[in-house]
Image (cartoon, helix red, strand yellow):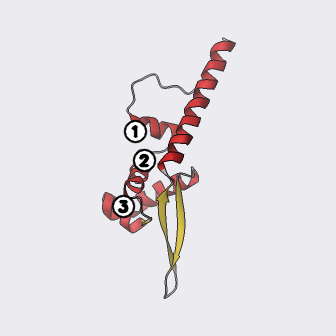
Amino acid sequence: MIQFMCKQADFKELIMCSFGISKGSYRIMVELLKNKEWQSIKQLQKTLGVERSSVQKALSELLSKKLVKRRQINQEKGGYFYIYKCINRQELKSRMINIIDEWTRNIKLEIEAW
């Protein structure tokens, strides 16, 4: 089966489709790109006005796709928390171009085999 977009899509949809991420994950990724600083779940939750579990689920998806980085911060009195940062914009662009090139190659192969 070939994945191909047969409808008009905005750039947001192209990003979500390319990386296979949800709208919630897209919102988190954009916020991390916009801020450019490492952010905690609590900061993202406050900025975006969403539930903690929604932020955690989105970050989990982004981590699994290697679109964000995570660092552990150890607290003085024990315990730790994580902070997150999106991979750089150039890396995102490069990965998207590779994904779209792969789509194109696969479509061309299917057309040639037809």
The quarter of the image holding the N terminus is top right
Q: Is residue 48 left or right of residue 61?
A: left
Residue 35 in sight here: yes
Say whether disc 2 or disc 3 marks the residue closer to the N-terminus: 2
Q: Which residue is mark 2?
A: 26
Left or right side of 40 for 48: left
Examine the rendered structure and indicate whether residue 30 appears above or below residue 109.
below
The amino acid pointed to by label 2 is Tyr
Q: Position of residue 96 (x, y in %)?
A: 53, 38
- Neighbor class of circle 1 (other Cα within 10 Å; few <14, some 14-19, many 20+) is few
Residue 43 is situated, as x and y percent measured from the top left of the image, at 37, 66
Element marked by disc 1: helix
Q: Residue furthest bottom?
A: 77
Residue at 44% from the left image edge and 50% from the top image edge = 25
Q: Quadrant of the C terminus?
A: top right
Q: Earlier in the sequence, mark 1 or mark 3?
A: 1
Residue 32 or residue 51, whichever sits in front: 32
Type of amino acid under label 3: Glu
Q: CA distance from mark 2 to mark 3?
A: 15 Å
Q: Position of residue 49 (x, y in %)?
A: 30, 59
Looking at the image, which is closer to me, 47 or 23? 47
- Residue indicated by mark 3: 51
Provide the residue designation for mark 1: 12
